[in-house]
Every structure is written in C-alpha cells, then in structure tokens.
Image (cartoon, helix red, strand yellow):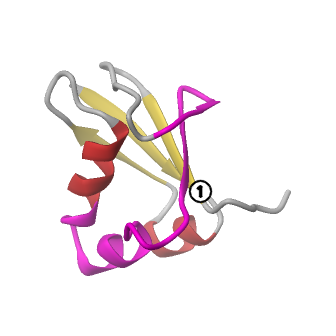
Amino acid sequence: MKVQVRYFAALREALGATEAVEMPNGSTLHGLRDMLQQRSPTHASALARQRAVRCALDQQLCSEDAVLSDGSEVAFFPPVTGG
C-alpha cells in the first residue's frame, strides 16, 4: 500500500516536505518510522527513537501503534512547532 509522509518544522528542514512510501498491508506508524530510519543517515538521525517526534494519521494525532491504510497521510513533527 502507498502512504504519503509529510514532515514539519525541523524534520522538514532535514528531510524535505513530503515523500511517498510503499508499506506492507497492516503496517503501523511504528513500522513506518523504523523503515524510514533505514532510508539514510539523515532519516536515522531525524527520526531516531530517542528524539521526541509526534505523529498524526489522516490529520488526527495518534500513537505509533495506529494501523496504516492505503492512501493514508502521515505527518511527523516535533512536539512543539511554530505557526
């Protein structure tokens, strides 16, 4: 399945605004974040587990155990972002 990943604030500066990702059916946000960390050293640093990163699925804040579906929009951002 294909999901659209959007980055905000410092993550956007490091990784760009958006990228499309193919994931297996039944994947979670946790699995997506793990997969993205493997894309490059920059991804690994920006999305590292020891960094505080919030996530939203289809514009709703959620935990990383949320299950993705085809066409989902995922957003990653720091806990505090400016306007």
Q: Magenta segment: does it hold 56?
A: yes
Q: Say if 28 sits above or below 72 in the image.
A: below
Label 1 amino acid?
A: Phe
Against 9, is 74 above or below? above
What residue is shown at x 41% (from left), y 29% (from top)?
66
Q: Point out the image quarter for the N terminus.
A: top left
Decide if residue 67 is on the left or right side of residue 80: left
Q: Residue 71: image x %, image y %?
A: 36, 21
Residue occupying image coordinates x 62% and y 62%: 78
Q: Is residue 67 left or right of residue 17?
A: left
Query: Which stretch appears magenta?
Result: 37-63
Q: Which of the two residues, 39 or 32, is positioned nearer the viewer here?
A: 32
Q: In the image, what residue occupies the spot 42% across and 44% down?
A: 5
Q: Which residue is mark 1?
A: 77
User: On the picture, is 74 further left or further right than 26?
Assistant: right
Badge 1, how many Cα within 10 Å: few under 14, some, many 20+?
Answer: some
In the rendered image, residue 25, in percent from the top left (x then y), is placed at: 17, 22
